[in-house]
Amino acid sequence: MKLSGLFTLILLLYSAFFSAFTFAASSIDFKLEGVSGDIEDNIDSYLSTISVPKGNNYSFFESKVRKNIVEAIQVYGFYHPEITINLTLDDDDLIVFVEIKLGPRVKLANVNIQVNGEAGDDPMFINLLNTMPLTSGANLSHQNYDKFKADITKLALARGYFDGKWQKSEVRVSIKKNLADIDLIFDSKQRYAFGESVLSNQTKSAVIVSELATFKPGQEFESHLVAEYSLALFNSRYFQSASVVPDMNARKDGQVPMIITVINHPNNTYEVGVGYLSDVGFRGSLGWKKPWINSRGDSVSAHLEYSTVQQEFTFDYDIPIEDPITNIAKVQFGFQRKDNKDTKSKLYTFQLQRQFELESKWLRTWFVKVEQEDFTQGSQVGSSLMILPGVSFARTKQRGGVDPYWGNQQLFSFEVASPIWGADTEMIKVQSRTKYLRSINRTHFFTSRVDLGAIYVDEIESVPASMRFFAGGSQSIRGYEYETVTPVDDKEAYIGGRYLTVGSLEYGYQFAEKWRIGFFADAGTSTNDFSEPMSLGIGTGIRWMTPIGPIKLDFAVPMNTVTDTKYTFHLYIGPEL
């Protein structure tokens, strides 16, 4: 064969073999075999950085793929992989088939880990060293090595070893022997203590800032105490923002000064709420708060609620006792006027409270209430004076901020009246509310609520109208008008009950980023002897999630008891918990 013919044949073979790769691909699809789990995920992460090859430069592309796979595998201690790569084009999609045989894993031979300096005797470091994943004979994992090294550095900063340095940190791999040696030597040097705390800005809150401190000068540094201090300042209701940070540049003589920065809340804050319920009409609320009235941290607030059937006003004066977050004395004045169905009432209240947060995060409140009420309930006209000492426990836990996806809310109260201390009747009242919120993938939401109450008294007529139990309404049994589920007298007038039992189940489905649809069933009764049937209401609603909380529109119908109400709907803004 002539030379020119041979050259032509070679050219034709070359053209036929590489014809599939004579134009550029627009996308890459990697197909991995032989790996799974974390290793596969890590390889995918490394390969995601590789760009589509330009022109016919597939040789460089393949070497880049191989290099990235090797690096991704070595993280887990595999230094002898066998990698086979095949490329093909499907339209404009470059498909990369990769078969991987990991081979034997590198083992750890000599592991030398030391913590010198004062941290050598620190129980937290001793515990960390006792749980280290790097031991002779174990598989090499660069991921474990990097994490353990970072854990030591993180713990050193958290415990106040601010001058600590790594004297040696290296991994030496013998590919021939398939073994690795590790040296990690950390010199913590001295541990710093808290120095003086300095307010970075002028504020009248200096007394409160000092009272909330979680550490004292000279106390050994611990970062969790700094975080708790910042959170306590922020949650104290006095500050819009608060930060506590160590002044690292000013550390000396074994102490680090702390810089505290706080920004006070405005002198006056306001809250406005609106809603509409088919059974009570328009509802509105206005709140006002003045968080500071003196350097001690006393605060005042007022709250006004209005609807066509009930108007209520309360005024609170709060006095911090030792801790302005968890230990508060409160004086409260209030007035309530109600004109609903068969209930007419004017109620004046005066209350002394002592609130204290327990270690379990329950808020315990001891209280003494003085209530004077003039009322008409059905055919009964009465006037009463009640002096009610008691105690309540409340706790709310949630995750997700103003739009929680998990939470619990619990409230229990106990109060007692007796002629011995001047009340008009003798009675005991106990009440509880429990609410749970759970979700699946933040898409399916399940809410349950149980309200229970009991009044231990000879005759319900001796109890003022405001203390009796009524059910029905947006916060009770939806589908029934406000406070219409209750015992009646001979003239079919509502009289209120001694016992309350209400339960609710709700399912919510999030069908868009800020929108949910809900389906619910509420059931219960207010009764004196449980002779009445349970009232059941079912319905559906829409929820719009806003930065200030959900806006809810519910439509409900009564199911199994005689009522003139055909349906109810409720439009309101309020938190889930």
Image (cartoon, rainbow, N blue to C red):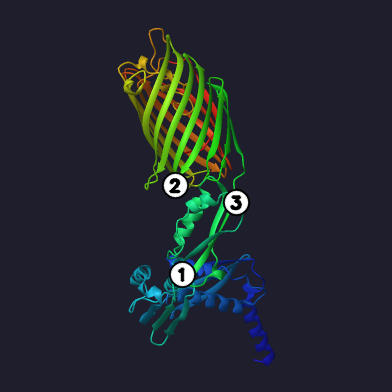
| Percent of width and height locating residue 172 | 43, 84
Where does label 2 land, which residue?
A: 322
**Residue at horizontal 43 percent and vertical 35 percent from the top:** 353
**Relative to residue 262, is residue 231 drawn left or right?**
left
Q: Residue furthest top?
A: 491
**Residue at horizontal 37 percent and vertical 47 percent from the top:** 360
| Percent of width and height locating residue 532 | 34, 18
**Residue at horizontal 50 percent and vertical 38 percent from the top:** 318
Q: Residue furthest bottom?
A: 2
CB within 8 Å, label 2 to label 1: no
Q: CA distance from mark 3 to mark 1?
A: 28 Å
Q: CA distance from mark 3 to mark 2?
A: 19 Å
From where the camera sits, is residue 481 visible? Answer: no
Where does label 3 land, which residue?
A: 203
| Percent of width and height locating residue 10 | 64, 85
Q: Foreground residue, 174 or 98?
A: 174
Q: Foreground residue, 441 or 575?
A: 575
Which element is circle 1 on? Answer: loop
**Amino acid carrying mark 1 in the image:** Tyr
Looking at the image, is mark 2 or mark 1 earlier in the sequence?
Answer: 1
Looking at the image, is mark 3 or mark 2 earlier in the sequence?
Answer: 3
Q: CA distance from mark 2 to mark 1?
A: 28 Å
Where does label 1 land, which residue?
A: 192
Q: Residues within 10 Å of mark 3 (few under 14, many from 20)?
A: some
